[in-house]
Amino acid sequence: MRTRLSICRKKTRFASEAAALVVALAADVPLRPYRCDRCRQFHLTSRTKGKRVLRGMASGAD
């Protein structure tokens, strides 16, 4: 699915997947990085249906 340009402009951009992962793993909600087809940088999304879940995000148990 192609990212809408208006959405891309609103999201924080990360130069690398590693930088996006640092923020994703520190978040209170499950997030995953993806490469944007518009700006070619990385954004974060909360959509995880059908996607692999990163370690540290697998369960909401504290």
Image (cartoon, rainbow, N blue to C red):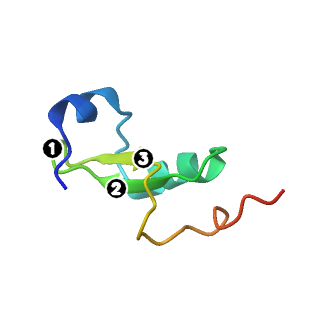
Question: What is the crowding at mark 1: few (fewer than 14 residues within 10 Å), some, or many (at least 20)?
Answer: few
Whether residue 23 sits left or right of residue 12 in the image: it is right
Which residue is nearer to you in this view: 46 or 33?
Answer: 46
Please determine whether, in this image, residue 24 is positioned above or below residue 59.
above
Tags 3 and 2 in contact by the CB under 8 Å rule? yes
Task: Give me the disc on residue 28.
Answer: none
Q: Position of residue 17 (x, y in %)?
A: 40, 56
Residue at (42, 46) in percent of width and height: 44
Helix, strand, or loop for circle 2? strand
Residues at marks 3 and 2, CA–CA distance in whole angstroms: 6 Å
Question: What is the crowding at mark 3: few (fewer than 14 residues within 10 Å), some, or many (at least 20)?
Answer: many
Helix, strand, or loop for circle 3? strand
Mark 1 or mark 3: which comes first in sequence? 1
Residue at (65, 67) in percent of width and height: 58
Residues at marks 1 and 3, CA–CA distance in whole angstroms: 14 Å
Tags 1 and 2 in contact by the CB under 8 Å rule? no
Residue named by callout 1: 38
Whether residue 19 sits left or right of residue 41 in the image: it is right
Q: Position of residue 41 (x, y in %)?
A: 27, 47
Q: Position of residue 30 (x, y in %)?
A: 57, 53
Three-letter amino acid code at disc 2? Answer: Tyr
Residue named by callout 3: 44
Which residue is nearer to you in this view: 21 or 59?
Answer: 59
Residue named by callout 2: 34
Say which quadrant the C terminus sits in: bottom right
Residue at (64, 47) in percent of width and height: 26
Tags 1 and 3 in contact by the CB under 8 Å rule? no
Three-letter amino acid code at disc 3? Answer: Leu
Residues at marks 1 and 2, CA–CA distance in whole angstroms: 12 Å
